[in-house]
Amino acid sequence: MKHEKSVAAFKEAFEVIPGGVDSPVRAFKAVGGYPPFISHGKGGYIYDIDGNEYIDFVQSWGPLIFGHADSDIENAVIDAVKKGLSFGAPTLLETELAKEVIAIYPFMDKLRFVSSGTEAVMSAIRLARGFTKKDDIVKFKGCYHGHSDSLLVQAGSGAATFGTPSSPGVPADLVKHTLLAEYNNIENIRECFKDSKNIACVIIEPIAGNMGLVPASEEFLKELRELCDKNGALLIFDEVMSGFRASLNGAMGHTSVVPDMATFGKVIGAGMPVGAFGARAEIMAHLSPEGPVYQAGTLSGNPVAMAAGIASIKKLKADKNIYKDLEAKALRLANGLKLAAKEAGVDIQTTVRGSMFGFFFSETPVNNFADAAKCDGEFFAKFHQGMLEEGVYLACSLFEAGFISTKTTNEMIDKSVAAAERVLKKIK
Ligand SMILES: *Cc1c(COP(=O)(O)O)cnc(C)c1O
């Protein structure tokens, strides 16, 4: 496989864009080598500027559940574009998409649209604080909720549960209200509620996709729900990745636990920049202009982005078998990878939730970030490089989930599994 044009493009980008990329993971730092520069995508494939074809299991990090350049979504976007790109005034499209989403998540009465997952979570947390009149929040190690200040925290060396900034530029004063807990560890959450009587909300990826794919156990979510209720804290499900991915109603298709608020992104915009957050009317009534909690956006509810979201959600609702088919394919891939690893004598753990899949080269199950962090990053990097050369595009970090689209065929999966077997045998 030739990569000259991508290598040159990366160097050129490097001159004018920090690290050559507009979002750090794209730089391939965790796996080495150069990122392919993409010229276009079609269905389940992407093509780089050197003319290489890849089976795409990243799908723009989740949004493209119908693959690349789906004609229905494309047509909806083109129709919207012809009417004007943005008005900064209400359109019918916002109400339509809000109704579509609320019908899928009936615990929400109202929804507000923003332009990214980061913005959705940041706004949801402000609203939770405004509603409860409390300042502290709890997040879990290994869950990602975007790059807003109060969520860029890591375990501190001092207090057991209070975090320290994970990035320069985030004042310690801003994260001192963020408590950190271990995923799937209910004792840890109990401690948080002992350490602080001022907890506004607990935010969780109920199916974590940002430490590899690690679902929360049903028992854990149930106890978490009880603790939030007992302590007057809101429970927020961050469904930016799992929403419309793990099932039509995201993680809620896999658990009986109902949150107070949910945040969305990725699939809700089908590849256009859309985020959203919603809750019952009583909570949403605190949001301006109905209530005092301020939140705004010049491009929020953008008509072109709304059109893409509507087309995508309608298509997801129209086909009753869609998630069964997606999950069958995800399982075919996961089971194939397991067999390939076995043949090569490599330990592997796999997980599937709807169209999401994950794998760890680990002897033991992965239930939290500490387990995930124990996995051999160098081995993953070699696997990733090998697969890329075989024409299989996987997320360039072991802490990411993978995705099946409706355009991913069994043939593509079998090809990828055969490639994995060759690569694993070679790097073992
Ligand atoms: C991707 C992601 C975000 C951030 O969304 P952006 O659109 O990248 O800002 C937040 N939460 C979760 C769970 C995500 O996967």
Image (cartoon, helix red, strand yellow):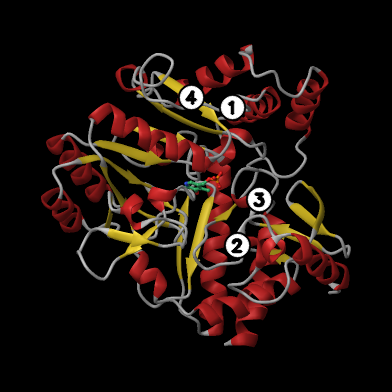
Of mark 2 and mark 4, the one earlier in the sequence is: 2
Of mark 1 and mark 2, the one earlier in the sequence is: 2
Secondary-structure class at tag 2: helix
Q: Residue at x 39, y 13 (%)?
A: 290
Label number found at residue 61: none
Label number found at residue 59: 3
Nearer to us of marks 4 and 3 is 4
Q: Residue flagged by tag 4: what amino acid is it?
A: Arg
> For mark 3, does the 10 Å Cα neighbourhood hold few (<14), some (14 to 19), or many (20 or more) residues?
many
Relative vertical location of residue 360 with respect to residue 228 in this rendering, above or below:
below
Of mark 1 and mark 4, the one earlier in the sequence is: 4
Residue 260 visible? The answer is no
Label number found at residue 25: 2
Q: Quadrant of residue 38?
A: bottom right
Residue corresponding to mark 4: 112
Q: Contact, CB < 8 Å: mark 2 with mark 3?
A: no
Residue corresponding to mark 1: 300
Q: Quadrant of residue 385?
A: bottom right
* Residue in front for this viewpoint, 167 or 199: 167
Q: Residue flagged by tag 2: what amino acid is it?
A: Val
